[in-house]
Image (spheres, rainbow, N blue to C red):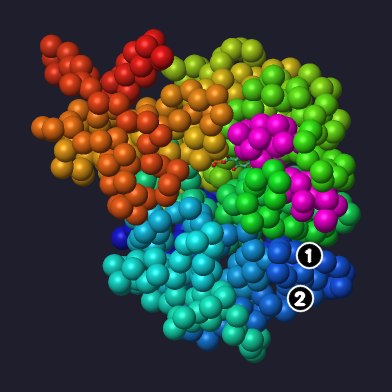
Amino acid sequence: DPAQSLPRQIWPEEFAARYRAEGYWKGETFGSFLRARAAAHPERLAVSDGVNRWSYAEVLARSEAAAGGYMALGLKPGDRVLVQLPNVATFLPAVFGLFLAGLIPVYVLPAHRRTELEHFARRSGAKAVVTLDQFDGFAYPAMAAEVRDLVPDLQHIIVAGEAGGHISFDSFGQKPEAFPEIDPSSVAFLQISGGSTGLSKLIPRTHDDYIYSFAASGPICGLSEHSVYLCALPAAHNFPMSSPGIFGTLYAGGRVVMAPNPAAETCFKLIEAERVTITGLVPPLALLWMEAAPKTRHDISSLEVLQVGGAKFVAEAAARVRPVLGCTLQQVFGMAEGLVNYTRLEDPEEIIVQTQGRPISPADEVLILDDEGNPVEDGTPGHLLTRGPYTIRAYHNEPAANARSFTPDGFYRTGDIVKRLEGGYLSVQGRAGDHINRAGEKISAEEVEEHLLAHPAVFDAAVVSIPDEFLGERICAFIVPRGEKPKGAEVKAFMRKRGLAEFKVPDQVVFVPEFETTAVGKVSRKVLRARLREEFMKKE
Ligand code: J2J
């Protein structure tokens, strides 16, 4: 049963004991750290969006009321709850309420649609979903209701804003009589993987390990109680959530500003109004901001640090950040499975521009191996494997993927090809897998192919990444038609109708009469994709 109960222990005992003894895991929980901050500075502002401005005390009070509401529905500690919320202040009480009640958030992106929501519901065994009435013209509750009809375990739809017959998040007002005891080493939430092969997998993160990762990120990112973090990327992404993101900022006693979208003008206005000091972007957005900055009428001089990560930021663009935006660039190379690398704010400009940083922790173990599994020399590209106090040892309930993605001694195979430079800095060279990194969103070629094959006029399909000046990579679908070939636009519309996030819809559709086969039979998908890409690029 894919929705079976969560693992009790993720790290072998000897590692857990060491991470505790060395002070990485402090025994804090999400609930305990929020309570500590709310007690230390109750009146200080914690979060704002276009509508709400809440102090630490208000965030805690709303989180406790939310916990009471969840518990009154009969949800029990360990139950999973899908959270599909855009960047609104309510994100905080919604998830801290879950943490306080011992419930397990499963983070879903606002861009995800029916098919993905159904997949996460089944995989996690979620009993409830928390969402917003509508955002950016999309009605989330209707989609949640469709999925509830398909997935028997999913019972409750909790809606912030106009509940329209569903359970109203905003009417949760009753603090429970008692809160459950939370074990800091237990799973706190399930994060979603980029889905390098097949469908997205669920990543179990514990209170201990995750809090360590964002607490330790704070000093590396220059956070203090005076920091104002603009959450420009979708809050559910691991990067804006924890590197140092919204949680790291609250841990440091700073303030979070939720941006409704990451467009330059939207964010410049917020930077000026809220005196934002730090934010994080994916490379295409950083390029747009650099284009917009010289023309803006907004004062963005409060911005001290611009983090860029999620995909490779090319050195030529990286070099322009300081001159154009007047702030320090911090490159961030991280993954929802764990390991996060940062360039340090005080590093020489050359390191900041040329590398993707070095690990957070002295306890992060990094291996760079050749195809045979032997360590390579520094400066030589190889496969990056890692193990450490905040890198998972297994996905939730994925025996086949776990056998591929982790070594017997617990190293995570990141799939990234990197070079180690002096001082342990890493330079990302590419990746071994076949997924597409489209503006920081990871898309599995296999998953898109499966959907294309469902189209009656598609005989065969191969999906590849094509280098794209703006997106970094775009999705190109090669299709062998069955009978009369459909229009490219029709194929894309078909994908949307299947309930997929817009970012998975191919940017380009190319029809070919047939796929190459060898005398022996079909070539492997991996080889086929590589050859199609190569030939296509030659013609471009
Ligand atoms: C090249 N590739 C990068 C970078 C991630 C912080 C920052 C990013 C993520 C993230 C994250 C890259 N240069 N600077 O979780 O906490 C690619 C690698 C990596 C994969 C992970 C965080 N930064 N990547 O992007 O789970 O291929 O996490 O393995 O979404 O993104 O993707 P994801």
- Residue that mark 1 sits on: 46
Q: Residue at x 82, y 46 (%)?
A: 298
Q: Residue 289: within the magenta?
A: yes
- Judge by depth and name the residue closer to the eye, 400 or 57: 57
Q: Are marks 2 and 1 in contact (CB under 8 Å)?
A: yes
The answer to whether 470 appears left or right of 263 in the picture is: left
The response on whether ligand 1 sits within 8 Å of label 2 is no
Q: Residue 85 location, x and y as percent?
A: 55, 62
Q: Amino acid at mark 1?
A: Ala
Under tag 1, what secondary structure? strand
- Residue that mark 2 sits on: 58
Q: CA distance from mark 2 to mark 1?
A: 9 Å
Q: Residue 119 location, x and y as percent?
A: 36, 56
Q: Amino acid at mark 2?
A: Glu
Relative to 110, does residue 485 appear above or below in the rendering?
above
Under tag 2, what secondary structure? helix
Q: Quadrant of residue 527?
A: top left
